[in-house]
């Protein structure tokens, strides 16, 4: 079953949905070796998903590099 992705207003093929759903897991090193191999293979053949993952990688890097705000009060008594 295909679903509509609101932010791009398009219907994605099932493999693309699968790849995009697993991209975040891949960035967090939470995929099995088999799943990582499948994702790499898909990205090598799908320019759209490759661009999506590149953007996701960039946003993830920026978020992880952002400074954490100091707490407004002590967290421990």
Image (tube, helix red, strand yellow):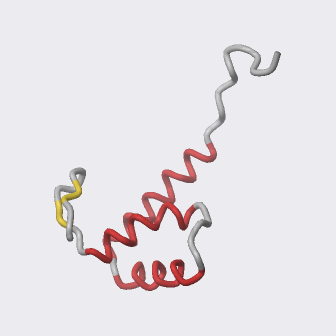
Residue 75, relative to residue 63: is it above or below?
above
Where is residue 13 shown, x and y percent of the image?
Answer: 24, 74
Where is residue 76 shown, x and y percent of the image?
Answer: 80, 20
For the point 51% across and 79% down, the residue is 35
Residue 73, relative to residue 47: is it above or below?
above
Residue sitting farthest toward the right: 77
For the point 54% across and 67% down, the residue is 26
Count of labels shown? 0
* Quadrant (top left/top right/bottom left/bottom right) for the C terminus: top right
For the point 56% across and 45% down, the residue is 63
Residue 35 falls left or right of residue 9: right
For the point 44% across and 85% down, the residue is 41
Residue sitting farthest toward the front: 1
Residue 57, relative to residue 73: is it above or below?
below
**In front: 55, or 3?**
3
Where is residue 55 shown, x and y percent of the image?
Answer: 43, 59
* Quadrant (top left/top right/bottom left/bottom right) for the N terminus: bottom left
Residue 33 falls left or right of residue 17: right
Residue 14 falls left or right of residue 25: left
């Amino acid at each position: 079953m295909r679903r509509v992705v609101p932010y791009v207003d398009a219907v994605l093929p099932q493999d693309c949905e699968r790849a995009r759903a697993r991209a975040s897991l891949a960035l967090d090193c939470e995929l099995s070796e088999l799943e990582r191999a499948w994702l790499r293979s898909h990205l090598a053949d799908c320019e759209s998903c490759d661009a999506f993952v590149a953007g996701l990688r960039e946003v993830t890097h920026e978020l992880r590099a952002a400074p954490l705000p100091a707490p407004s009060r002590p967290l421990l008594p």
